[in-house]
Amino acid sequence: MSPRILVPFDGSPLSRQALETALTEYPDGDIVALHVTDPFEPGYSVYDVPYDIESEPIHGSEEWHDRADELATELLEEAQSVAAEHDAELTLETAVGEPGREIVGYATDNDVDQIIMGSHSREEDARILLGSVTESVVFRAPMRVSLVR
C-alpha cells in the first residue's frame, strides 16, 4: 500500500518546495494538496477583497466567498502543474477554518501517514521560528510531520 501524504499548499515558495519534496520522495504515494482558507486572516488582503469595518463582516459576504474560492482554485491549479512537472497525480482538497486545526483534522479523518509542509508560510521575515500554523500542526498531529526549509 502506498503512503498517503498531505501537503498544505498556500502558494508560497515553501509550500511549493514541500510539494516537490513529497512528489520526489514518494513517487508512488497518494499525495493530497490541501488549501485552507482562513476567514479570520487580518485584513483579508490575501484575497484582494476590500475590508470595511463599518460594513457587513467580509467573511460572511458572497464577494469574500467567491474570491476565496477563486484563489483556492488558482492555487490548486498551481499545485496540479507542479505535479505535472513530476508526471504525478494529486488529490486536490480545500477547507475553510483555522489552518492548523483544518490540516490536522483532514489528516486524522483521512488516514494520512505523513504531513510535509514548509517551516513557515507567507511571512518569510517573521520572527516566529516555525510559524503559527506549522507549530500548531507539529504539536497536534498524531502522525509524522516533516518540515521543509
Image: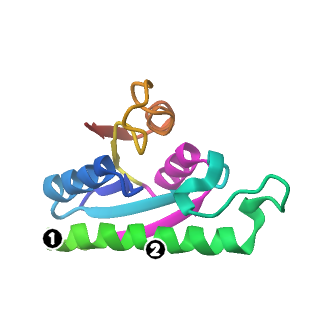
Q: Position of residue 98 (x, y in %)?
A: 61, 48
User: Which type of secondary structure does the marked residue at label 1 adopt?
Assistant: helix
Residue 11: within the magenta? Answer: no
Q: Which residues, given as a range, are shown in magenta? A: 90-111
Q: Nearer the viewer, residue 97 or 72?
A: 72
Q: Residue at x 29, y 50 (%)?
A: 13
Q: How many marks?
A: 2
Q: Position of residue 97 (x, y in %)?
A: 63, 54
Q: Is residue 26 left or right of residue 56?
A: left
Q: Is residue 86 left or right of residue 22?
A: left
Q: Position of residue 14 (x, y in %)?
A: 30, 46
Q: CA gap, disc 2 to disc 1?
A: 19 Å
User: Which type of secondary structure does the marked residue at label 2 adopt?
Assistant: helix
Q: Which residue is mark 2?
A: 73
Q: Which residue is mark 1?
A: 85
Name above or below for residue 76 compared with residue 43: below
Q: Amino acid at mark 1?
A: Glu
Name above or below for residue 134 compared with residue 66: above
Where residue 6 sits, quadrant-wise, is bottom left
Q: Earlier in the sequence, mark 2 or mark 1?
A: 2
Where residue 7 sits, quadrant-wise, is bottom left
Q: Nearer the viewer, residue 142 or 20?
A: 20
Q: Amino acid at mark 2?
A: Thr
